[in-house]
Image (cartoon, rainbow, N blue to C red):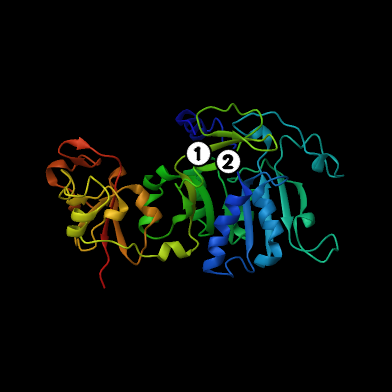
Amino acid sequence: MAQSDLFKARTGKNDEFYTQYIDIEKEMNAYLEFDPNVFKGKTVLLPCDDPEWSNFTKFFAQNFERFGLKKLISTSYAVESKNYKSSYQPTLFEVNDPKFDESKTRIKGKIFTLTQDKTGDGKVDVDDLEWTYLKGDGDFRSDEIIRLKNESDIIVTNPPFSLFREFLAWIIESEKKFVIIGNMNAITYKEVFPLIKNNKMWTGIRFNQRLNGKNMTFYVPDDYILSGTEVDIDKNGKKMISVAGTGWYTNLEHGRRHQPLALMTMSDNIKFSKHKEIRGVEYQKYDNYDAIEVPFTDAIPSDYEGIIGVPISFLTKYNPEQFEIIGASDNGAIDEQFKIPHFKKHNEPYIDGQKLYKRIFIRHKRK
């Protein structure tokens, strides 16, 4: 995705990014593999959604019985309240329903619920969804949606990029389980990093990974102007765009989170590392942090007892039984004891006077 497009999304000019069914399926299956009962008896809320055609709603509705859900709730945000003004036409599903109200369709959100077999076909699935208009526009900050949040056990959605910090805080304050999509740079936000450091939140299965040569790819509105190199049109003529550095954040456990990294000793890395920055070169220390620079996760020395600076992408491999997170360079989120006194005013990591990109500081956990 072009950087200008991502900037527009972050600033709220276009938050209309719709998640593919296959991406939802692969992510949720990872949590089910770790705990087959993760959704059993739970109420799942899908806010910031478009239930009439949303892949989140479709996925959980179609798997309602298999997951053993208690209730599914999905809400939409009124078209007139959105920052991004696209062309709007009510769906035939809504227009052909006796509840259709032309005076409400643009200014009210909608709520879809699923609890039981309504059609009498002996199964609970997408055909049993019931809907009505919300009293308000469906803003997640409204009292109406807050009541639904309080009723739910797990929140799953792709929140607007521009509201990610606020949306995450909205979840955290209620101590709900969640699986949401966000950008990798959110890791170092001052509102986000403490949650990661304290193991209240972590990356999901797919994060910042290119699969089949592409980043995570989303559908966009028909009138969205495509730009950049990673754009596409699917077989049905729907516009798609790939977004670099994007993936899932969660506080649901999954197996990859507990897989230890296989690492070499410092001396073996210097001898055999595949990275020219490491092989035959001594590990460097920062000018302003009492830590060594390790630019690649697979080059973390297994026998180093001190503080190690690693790229933020390390968190996709982070195992809390293997490592302890000490802090981060961004926002000064590290104890002053680990900074070199003369450079305490600088948060960005430096080596030989050259500024590096954001770093996470870690150390090995020893039994």
Q: Which mark is residue 274?
A: none
Q: Which residue is at a point 48% across and 63% down the rendered structure image?
A: 254
Question: Mark 2 touching mark 1, by CB under 8 A?
Answer: yes
Tag 1, which secondary structure? strand
Measured as percent of width and height from the top left, residue 103 is found at: 79, 34
Q: Which mark is residue 218?
A: 2
Q: Residues within 10 Å of mark 2 (few under 14, many from 20)?
A: some
Total numbered badges shown on the rendered structure: 2
Vertical position of residue 263 compared to residue 287: above or below: below
Q: Which residue is at a point 18% across and 45% down the rendered structure image?
A: 286
Which amino acid type is shown beneath numbered disc 1? Val
Vertical position of residue 43 compared to residue 145: above or below: below
Asked if residue 334 can be seen in this view, the reply is no
Q: Which residue is at a point 32% across and 65% down the rendered structure image?
A: 322
Tag 2, which secondary structure? strand
Depth check, front residue: 4 or 73: 4
Q: Which residue is at a point 57% across and 50% down the rendered structure image?
A: 23
Measured as percent of width and height from the top left, residue 324 is found at: 30, 61
Q: Which mark is residue 243?
A: 1
Q: Residues within 10 Å of mark 1 (few under 14, many from 20)?
A: many
Left or right of residue 308: residue 13: right
